[in-house]
Image (cartoon, grey):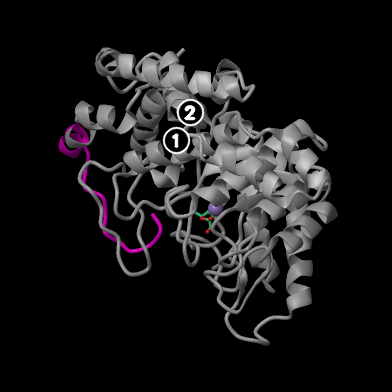
Amino acid sequence: MAGDLPLAQDDIERLNAGLADALDDDYGSLGRQLGRRGIDIGAVKAKVAGFSVAVPSWGAGRGGTRFAKFPIPGEPTNIHEKLEDCAVIQQLGRATPRVSPHFPWDKVSDYRALRDEAAALGLGFDAVNSNTFQDQPGQAVSYATGSLSSTRADVREQAVAHNIECIEIGKQLGVTDLTVWVGDGTNFPGQQDLGRSLDRYLDAASEVYAALPGDWRMLIEHKMFEPAFYSTVISDWGSSILVAQELGEKAKCLVDLGHHAPNVNIEQIVARLHRFGKLGGFHFNDSKYGDDDLDSGSINPHQLFLVFNELVEAEMNPRGDFRPAYMIDQSHNVTDPIESMLSSAEAIVGAYAKALLVDREALLAAQEANDTMMAFQALRAAYRTDVTPILAAARAEAGGAIDTIAAYRASGWRGRKAQERRAAGTTAGIV
Ligand code: LRH
Ligand code: MN
């Protein structure tokens, strides 16, 4: 049981008390509105209360770009402080009970102790992320030539060994998913043979696959470009699903919303991966141009809704073991990371709640009748519904804050941490 939650629960309840009447009024009127549409608001609230998304450990600190990083006083600089901040997000939002760690960024000497430390804060862990896109001090060979697809056997072996080390760490943290994203690719035509690169990747990835315990999954994360700018070995969902099918049943595909060209129909990719039983997980974020890692739902909330519309359809028509790992993957360059993750989690849960409001019978009937406008209106009626009262009610009933950002600011958490924590570095880059 979570012993030492970071914030005073009384403070949260006192703030909620001042907002409860208004929430009751809003919830009541929404309940009547949904009732007229044949929807039981209580049933939607129950589904929302059961929904959760993991936060990235690397999102708890300020992120940066290749140009600069602007840290804020009191931001976390190690996994222990990151867990504290993730516990604040969970205590206020009650939708992010797991943290997805990244290695070696979150390396410690005792992972069982880390697991207990997280549990005391009301947290668990989600998919472990390997890192063969940066060289670490003292590393035997460099990843400058790529990692799992490098032409150099010693580099591939090092990358395989690192992924297997992440599995061993994950076992101690109680997780059963390994996320494998490799930045491998080229900047010049001809730099590498596009076919052989994939073959080398497949050989090395199959060694990682062979090391997976029976109940584990390997989540293959595709990305169109960056850090490579001419070709990327696992560049799109097609490459990802072919690799996952080649590797085996435990290999699934992870969709990072920011890893596609602008205007790509990501909800259709979700439907395709689900159709073939290969939908393994998500990295939620938003973007306008490239892999901007902006707050989920901040640029294109309709796309997020349409993705969840496919996920609710998938939930109702499961293929294989349908249990996608829902995770946030963002870089908070200009906001307080805690506020961004509170706001993003709300946007993600909100998209799920709206997708639950779709009248699927009416939608299917209109589709079958080729009544395009009524099919679209079935989605639009759900999308334009303000589900905020449902989210706030579910949160408050779980001990969270009705207004998460107001409660966070009232807590003075960041100011307190600025007194306690050492200043973060200003080295440019993602973390
Ligand atoms: C690559 C990526 C991947 C993580 C990294 C932090 O762009 O999305 O998921 O390893 O960001
Ligand atoms: Mn990602």
Q: Is residue 70 magenta?
A: no
**Image side of residue 245 versus residue 7, left or right:** right
Q: Is residue 423 magenta?
A: yes
Report the front residue among 351 and 74. Answer: 351
Q: Which residues are magenta?
A: 416-431
Quadrant showing the C terminus: bottom left
Q: Is residue 238 above or below residue 348?
A: below
Q: Could you tell me if the residues under marks 2 and 1 are in contact, i.e. CB atoms within 8 Å?
A: yes
| Kind of residue sitting beneath label 1 | Glu
Q: Secondary structure at mark 2?
A: loop
Label disc, if present, on residue 346 of the rendered structure: 1
Residue at position x 72%, y 41% in the image: 217
Report the front residue among 220 and 337. Answer: 337
Report the front residue among 157 and 361. Answer: 361
Say if disc 2 is inside 8 Å of ligand 2. Answer: no
| Kind of residue sitting beneath label 2 | Ala
Earlier residue among tags 2 and 1: 2
Assign the magenta stretch its main secondary structure: loop
Q: Position of residue 137 (x, y in %)?
A: 43, 59
The part of the image, by quadrant, that contains residue 52 is top right
Q: Secondary structure at mark 1?
A: helix
Give the residue pinned by disc 2. Answer: 95
Label 1 neighbour load within 10 Å: few <14, some 14-19, many 20+ = many
Label 2 neighbour load within 10 Å: few <14, some 14-19, many 20+ = many
Q: Position of residue 32 (x, y in %)?
A: 51, 18
Label disc, if present, on residue 361 of the rendered structure: none
**Image side of residue 144 versus residue 395, left or right:** right
Q: Is residue 193 above or below residue 239?
A: below
Q: Position of residue 241 (x, y in %)?
A: 77, 56
Residue 388 appears in the figure: yes
Tell how many labels: 2
